[in-house]
Image (cartoon, rainbow, N blue to C red):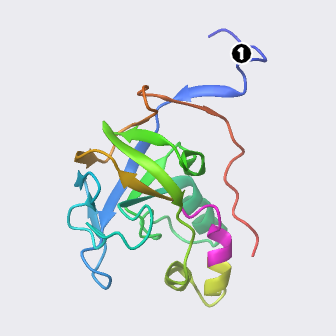
């Protein structure tokens, strides 16, 4: 492989994927880890507690980066559990913050990034420990809590599906520094 030129050394082309999918049928129901989910344009994930609700912008579906979850759990000395944030879609290799206001595809389905899915007290309480207060958890996930999005097309999402831009099946992204857990 030829050496990279200075013009290209800061960029890579890579395929980013869905690591995990989950839903909650109701607020107090157990999380359901699924291999695939059905998505309806304008309504979200069939069977999820937020399906067809429009209480908040981007309520159709939520995404979170596996790397952010792993960094938080490693900093706390906890085992990896990619579903701890209770977001619908756990991704790997994509910077979700960059998708706010943009249309993107995942597994051939189109979505529009609406806003960051900032952490709430519920997330803080779920991940708190004797050494870590809920407010500290919330602070650790600020700007790392994921993305709220609207579903623009209908179909099935599957674990392993790839992300793409509006016209590309690959995402071109500048390399970013590794996710580092904030000290609390």
The one of 32 and 49 positioned closer to us in this rendering: 49
- In screen coordinates, is 132 left or right of 149? right
Q: Position of residue 182 (x, y in %)?
A: 73, 66
Q: Is residue 108 magenta?
A: no
Residue interval drawn in magenta: 138-146
- In screen coordinates, is 99 left or right of 37? right
Residue farthest top in this picture: 2
Helix, strand, or loop for circle 1? loop
Residue 65 visible: no
The one of 154 and 125 positioned closer to us in this rendering: 154
Q: Which residue shows up at 65% across the image and 84% down it?
A: 135
User: Where is 78 relative to 113, above or below?
Assistant: below
Q: Which residue shows up at 51% across the image and 78% down it?
A: 123
Q: Does the magenta stretch include residue 140?
A: yes
User: Where is 86 relative to 126, above or below?
Assistant: above
Q: Where is residue 179 in the image (x, y as percent from the top left)?
A: 67, 53
Q: Name the residue under label 1.
A: 4
Q: Which residue shows up at 56% across the image and 81% down it?
A: 124
Q: Position of residue 107 (x, y in %)?
A: 32, 39
């Amino acid at each position: 492989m030829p050496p990279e030129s200075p013009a290209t050394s800061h960029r890579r082309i890579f395929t980013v994927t869905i690591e995990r999918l989950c839903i909650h049928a109701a607020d107090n129901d157990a999380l359901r880890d699924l291999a695939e989910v059905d998505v309806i344009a304008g309504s979200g994930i069939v069977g999820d507690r937020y399906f067809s609700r429009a209480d908040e912008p981007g309520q159709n579906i939520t995404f979170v980066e596996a790397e952010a979850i792993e960094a938080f759990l490693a900093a706390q000395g906890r085992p990896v559990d990619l579903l701890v944030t209770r977001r619908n879609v756990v991704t790997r290799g994509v910077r979700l913050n960059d998708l706010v206001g943009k249309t993107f595809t995942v597994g051939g389905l189109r979505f529009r990034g609406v806003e960051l899915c900032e952490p709430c007290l519920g997330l803080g309480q779920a991940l708190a420990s004797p050494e870590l207060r809920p407010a500290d958890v919330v602070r650790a996930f600020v700007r790392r809590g994921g993305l709220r999005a609207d579903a623009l097309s209908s179909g099935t999402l599957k674990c392993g599906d790839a992300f793409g831009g509006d016209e590309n099946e690959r995402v071109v992204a500048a390399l970013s520094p590794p996710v580092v857990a904030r000290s609390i």
